[in-house]
Amino acid sequence: QVQLVESGGGLVQPGGSLRLSCAASGFTFSSYAMSWYRQVPGKERELVAAITSAGGSTNYADSVKGRFTISRDNAKNTVYLQMNSLKPEDTAVYYCNAKGRRWGLPVVYWGQGTQVTVSS
């Protein structure tokens, strides 16, 4: 059974930091590209950051460049999102995403999401 379980969300003041984690199981984590998305009510889900399967390449939304860092530990089947200098506009539900292939076919898995609220 495929599972992506996010944790680490919560309430933080502007300028603060949070570290999100996403623990994966049920698939070959090291073969999958991993991403973090976020969504606010009434808006489409947007890509925040992505990392290749071996962790050699990352990319970020312009709005988070220089503040957020995505990383992964393939030995622990976990991907992280370190969020620094948080702003109120970072408030959203953050989702973990895995993209790869299973039985030769492309597959995409999603976590259930974790709420991040940036407010004073």
Image (spheres, rainbow, N blue to C red):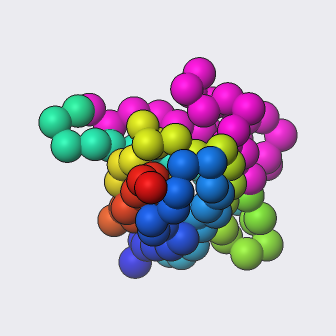
Q: Position of residue 102 (x, y in %)?
A: 48, 54
Q: Residue furthest top?
A: 62
**Quadrant housing residue 20:** bottom right
Disc tally is 0
Residue at figure coordinates x 76%, y 65% from the top left = 74
Residue at figure coordinates x 36%, y 48% from the top left = 92
Please tell me whether residue 47 belongs to the stretch shown in magenta. yes
Q: Residue furthest left?
A: 42
Please tell me whether residue 62 belongs to the stretch shown in magenta. yes
User: Where 42 falls versus 17 (above or below)?
Assistant: above
Is 61 placed left or right of 110 in the picture? right
Q: Which residues are magenta?
A: 44-71
Regarding residue 49, the answer to whether it shows in the image is: yes
Q: Position of residue 15 (x, y in %)?
A: 62, 48
Q: Compare residues 88 and 2 and report the one nearer the observer.
A: 88
The N terminus - image quarter? bottom left
The C terminus - image quarter? bottom left
**Quadrant housing residue 88:** top left
Regarding residue 100, the answer to whether it shows in the image is: no
Q: Position of residue 19 (x, y in %)?
A: 64, 63
Residue at figure coordinates x 83%, y 40% from the top left = 56
